[in-house]
Amino acid sequence: MALLEVNNLSVQLQTKTGFATAVDRLSFTLDTGEILGIAGESGSGKTMTALTLLGLLPQHAKVTGSAKFDGQELVGRTNKQWQQIRGNNIAMVFQDPMTSLHPMLSIKTQMTEHMITHLGISEKQAVIDAEELLIDVRIPDPKKALASYASQFSGGMRQRICIAMALACKPKLLLADEPSTALDVTVQAGILTLLNRLREEHHLSIIFITHDLGVLSSITNKLLVLYAGREVESGLTSTILQRPRHPYTQGLLDSLPQPESDEKLLKSIAGFPPELGKQPIGCAFAERCSFTEARCSGKEIAPTFLKDDHKFFCAVDPYAKQDRQEVEA
Amino acid sequence: MKKNPDSPWRQPLAVIGVTILVIWVLVAIFAPLIAPSNPIAQNYKELLPPNAHNWFGTDSVGRDILSRVVYGARITLPLSIMLVILAMIVGTIIGAIAGYFGGWVDAALMRLTDVVLAFPGIILAMAVAAALGAELRNAVFAVVLVAWPTYARLVRGLILSSKNADYVTSSRLLGASTTRALFVDLRPNISGPVFVLAALEAGNGMLLLSGLSFLGLGARPPSAEWGAMVSAGANNFDKWWIAVFPGLAILTAVLAFNFLGDALRDILDPRTAKALRE
Amino acid sequence: MSNAEPILTLNNVSVTYKRADRTKLTAVAGVDLTLNRGEILGLVGESGCGKSTLGKAAVGILPTSAGEIRFNGTPVAPLNRSVRSRELLKLQLIFQDPYSSLNPRRKIGDQLIDGLVNYGVDAEEARESSAKLLERVGLSRSTLTKYTHQFSGGQRQRIAIARALTLQPEVIIADEPISALDASAQAQVANLLVELVAELGMSMIFISHDLSVVRQISDRTAVMYLGKMVEIANTHEIWDDPRHPYTKALIQAIPKPDGKGFLPLELPGDVPDPRMPPSGCRFHTRCPLAIAECSVMEPKMAVTQNRISSCLLNNELKEKGSAHVV
């Protein structure tokens, strides 16, 4: 049984004009020790998906469908029921390590308080455990670190501390929302290495959310590409990045800087994603896609299934031929 | 009727504040038409409670209180507005000099404001008014002397916080002199908060001025100043109407200024204004 | 480039801050840099390496503590109470954060005409040319009468670019101009800058921590570490064959979207405290190739095999082994 089984999960947010769909019938599974990447632009619903799995959605948000974690249903929990899951079983690391640490409280207070209330251990034990956690995330001199404050650390070190705090209650699933985006590449490489080691040593499952396909390529096993709240393509990371079948995935890859080309201009997908709540019936990407045909709009796009759980939602499938040729060759 | 979404009048408090002020201004302008009697003429029997003829009653020398309250608007309102404008000008200039020049100029001016702010306003105003002689003009001067440091501090803070802002630097790179950058770039940042403060302070100024008159340090009898009238009521404690009606006049005007100040703050800040519309 | 004509030269420039706690911080320590006419020079390095400080010093926003900066031969005077000289108006900076580089309380049109009005142009004429610039950067002329809060980050940065262009500058220093923007706006704003540089015959120093973008848009790339320049070369040379171990580490840390699942290489340790920089080569504490001499001898930028870098193993201690060969 998969650790996390998400089925037809939808999230609707309240706006001025009514409810808008932020996440639209998403389905995916995650096994123990796996890293799933969720890719997409801002507004694609990737952060909303994570917040749903932690019960941290804004009030009045409507969630339908199912998300089973370790066999327990997450959808429809009360606040109290969420508290048993949050931190203990599912933890989260955010993009900005400065705002997720309290500037006026020592690292020790922030780490141990959380452990004492959640695990019911003594303060003494909590300090010992906190030191171990800091060693685990490679913070030099953990004793000194515990007595320090967030501002005394660099961005990378702060993010390591946030990861240590997230691991305090030994969660099985870690949600990482752009955890390395604000960091320098050298520091980012360190964080990626750390997360990968934690996966191996603690059999941690991770959902890694970012728009950076390079980062996803280096650390994830599986990939889910979102556009305007909907899945457009999913499968093994290697398959998707090497032989994408959805034009949007290809567009994302094309808009990365192309090191080999002499072209000085960066490519980008023209236009903007549809506004929240204004996704069309049919393919949401049709407006910006260069392969759009009449069959792209007006009715739901049926998924196409390929081997290794590779799935995409494109009625035109412009890269099909190319893909077949590659397979033959 | 559909309301214009951009209109600041969507804030009910602003509407109430402005309405009250407009009424008071109209009362002041048309006082001779509204007041049933001469405010200083002792036309009636003393200490009449409110009745069909003297709606607000009469005071200890037989003057119609309604007429006095109405004519009082001609004294208290313009004086309050004048003292606020004076305090604003003095405070803004001193604050701008302190914030702009910095260094010892700043230190000296700020110590001066500290000294003024160290005293409770009414005490300092009393001392100054008493020293200058109990006259309405001196009371106004005393209140200005007490009120300017608030503006100075605000303006200095605003200049300090934005004088090194990127947009000021960027203007300097485009060839603006420091004075121009400060005047052009910083003036809009300063004027909004200063006007808001002025509107909020107008109420305080009026209270202080009325307070001085109440203590006998401002308006002198028989002039119909609201504070002085409240004071007269204190001598006849059991005749509630003598103090209550001028007191209500002060209360409504102060409240109206405060409502207006709050509303102005929201309107003059484009971001708040935007948030209000959404 | 043999026919390169320098337009902005930085000679042994140092910038020292006095911090609030009275300690001194030398953010830039003796840097030489030349920007040639018509080129885009990328300036990269980790946060805290002094690249933004150098950019701000180059236009005169931050005073230098040593060295000399010349723009078209004119010494760049630091901004002070007096008005900036006419020659220097052709040297402009684009700030990182378009939320702070535009005044939220002034109409955009009023801000755009500032430079031209200072220059003596009639306000109506200035409005007209500002409107044209706005159209060039992809915004409508109705922008003139609006306030910044009505625009997204990407649009604001376009407005800030238009403002910097009003005086037809010859050199633009872009200080992380895209890093505060949404991923989707980044490429568009970077492209706009590249196009404008070519179209208007400008030169640009593009300061960024995003090496991939710098790789794509810049002619030459300069790499800084802890206040010092460590390597400068043509962009394709520096990427294909980095000579300084730090440059190499930076490049290897970029994750590649090839779906092969290789983790980028980590550069261990943090950037040292710039108030107490390591002795000798500042990179020796993190350098995988460091030898004993590296902590003693201070390397200088020097040319070896037509390439400039400041690594002892490339230059002064060449016989002890070459840093760029692994």
Image (tube, helix red, strand yellow):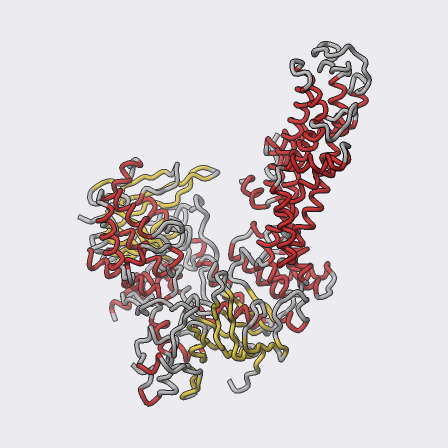
Closer to the camera, C178 or A232?
C178
Taking the view exactly as shown, the residue that stands out farthest to the bottom is C319
The C terminus of chain A - image quarter: bottom left
Corner quadrant of residue C44 = bottom left
User: Which residue is painted at 60% across and 76% down in the image?
Assistant: C71
User: Which residue is painted at 31% across and 81% down in the image?
Assistant: C292
In the image: residue A273, left or right of residue B185 = left
State whether residue B260 is above or below residue C155: above
In the rendered image, is residue A224 in sight?
A: no
Corner quadrant of residue C310 = bottom left
Where does residue B184 sit, x and y in percent of width and height? Answer: 67, 55
Where does residue A259 sit, x and y in percent of width and height? Answer: 40, 72
In the rendered image, is residue A40 in sight?
A: yes
Where does residue B67 sit, x and y in percent of width and height? Answer: 76, 19
User: Which residue is painted at 64% across and 65% down in the image?
Assistant: B174
Where does residue A184 sit, x and y in percent of width and height? Answer: 39, 65
